[in-house]
Every structure is written in structure tokens, then in C-alpha cells.
Image (spheres, rainbow, N blue to C red):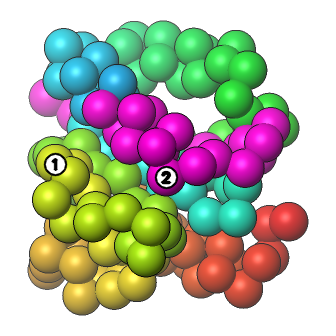
């Protein structure tokens, strides 16, 4: 069975505190696990980028909910495709705030923004979605989406 992947970017309506991000991480992991959705959510400088993957209907439903969420606006789908296997079998979130919280102990936290392909989640998978996320990551860190 093919896996549907959707990558989007959006802008937070306000700066997210580390506590806000941990709460978002916890809520997202719980909901996505119930729906069979995995992926990666990245936050940096009020910008979100996310890859959602799973069956098309639940992924589309989650994305529609995200578009209605008052915490973000300017949602833009960057990529939609069907693939043979998941790029992120476990859901994770990456954001830059390690000086504020000890994030390594938070389940689902990823150092993707800091390590890119060095992140264990990216080990030996050259999928289009992962390459695309790396490109978006580089743009985020340069401030290209502001």
C-alpha cells in the first residue's frame, strides 16, 4: 500500500514559547498516533514546516485542521506525493530552544535543525521528501521564508 506524504509551511501567529512547543509536540504525537500518521514538524523563527505521512484521508483531515488552527496562518502545501514507504516511521518535532529546556528528554524531539542528515531519523534514506525537507531546513535557517 502506498503512503501519502504532504509537506507544508506556515507562519505562527505569535512566537511560540518552549512550553507551547512541548505542548504542541505532545498533542500532535498523541493525535497522529491514533490516526496512523507519522512525519516531522519543524519550528524556527515563527515558521513551521511539516511532513505528514500515512493514508491520504487522515493526512488530509489533519492538514485541514491545521489550516483552521489559530496558532498559524499562511499555510502553503509545498509537496504532495505517494511513496512506497514512510520516511519517518516515528513522529518527531524539531525546534531551536535547547538553552531553555532540556529537550533531549522529551519524547519525539529531533535535532533535525542542528544535525540535518546527521540526525538518526535521516539515516540512509535519500527519499524525495527527506531531500526536500533538508532544502527547506536550509532556507529556514537562512531566514529565506520570512
Q: Is residue 127 above or below residue 87?
A: below
Left or right: 47 as drawn, with respect to 103: right
Q: Is residue 24 magenta?
A: yes
Left or right: 54 as drawn, with respect to 64: left
Mark number displayed over residue 70: none
- The first of marks 2 and 1 along the sequence is 2
Residue at disc 1, secondary structure? loop
Query: Which one is in front, 95 or 128?
Result: 95
Q: Position of residue 67 (x, y in %)?
A: 68, 22
Tag 2 residue: 18
| Distance between the alpha carbons at the discs numbered 2 and 1 | 14 Å
User: Which stretch is magenta?
Assistant: 1-26
Residue at 49 percent of width and 70 percent of height: 96
Residue 96 in sight: yes
Q: Position of residue 99 (x, y in %)?
A: 43, 76
Residue at 72 percent of width and 33 percent of height: 72
Callout 1 crowding tier (Cα within 10 Å): few <14, some 14–19, many ≥20: some
Quarter that holds the C terminus = bottom right
Q: Is residue 107 magenta?
A: no
Residue 85 in sight: no
Tag 1 residue: 107
Amino acid at each position: 500500500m502506498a503512503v501519502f506524504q504532504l509537506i507544508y509551511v506556515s507562519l505562527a501567529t505569535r512566537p511560540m514559547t518552549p512550553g507551547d512547543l512541548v505542548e504542541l509536540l505532545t498533542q500532535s504525537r498523541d493525535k497522529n498516533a491514533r490516526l496512523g500518521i507519522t512525519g516531522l514538524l519543524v519550528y524556527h523563527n515563527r515558521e513551521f514546516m511539516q511532513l505528514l505521512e500515512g493514508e491520504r484521508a487522515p493526512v488530509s483531515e489533519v492538514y485541514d485542521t491545521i489550516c483552521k488552527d489559530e496558532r498559524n496562518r499562511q499555510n502553503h502545501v509545498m509537496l504532495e506525493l505517494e511513496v512506497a514507504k514512510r520516511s519517518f516511521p516515528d513522529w518527531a518535532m524539531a525546534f531551536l530552544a535547547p538553552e531553555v529546556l532540556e529537550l533531549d528528554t522529551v519524547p519525539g524531539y529531533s535535532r533535525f535543525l542542528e544535525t540535518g542528515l546527521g540526525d538518526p531519523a535521516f539515516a540512509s534514506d535519500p527519499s524525495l521528501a527527506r531531500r526536500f525537507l533538508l532544502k527547506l531546513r536550509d532556507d529556514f535557517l537562512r531566514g529565506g521564508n520570512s
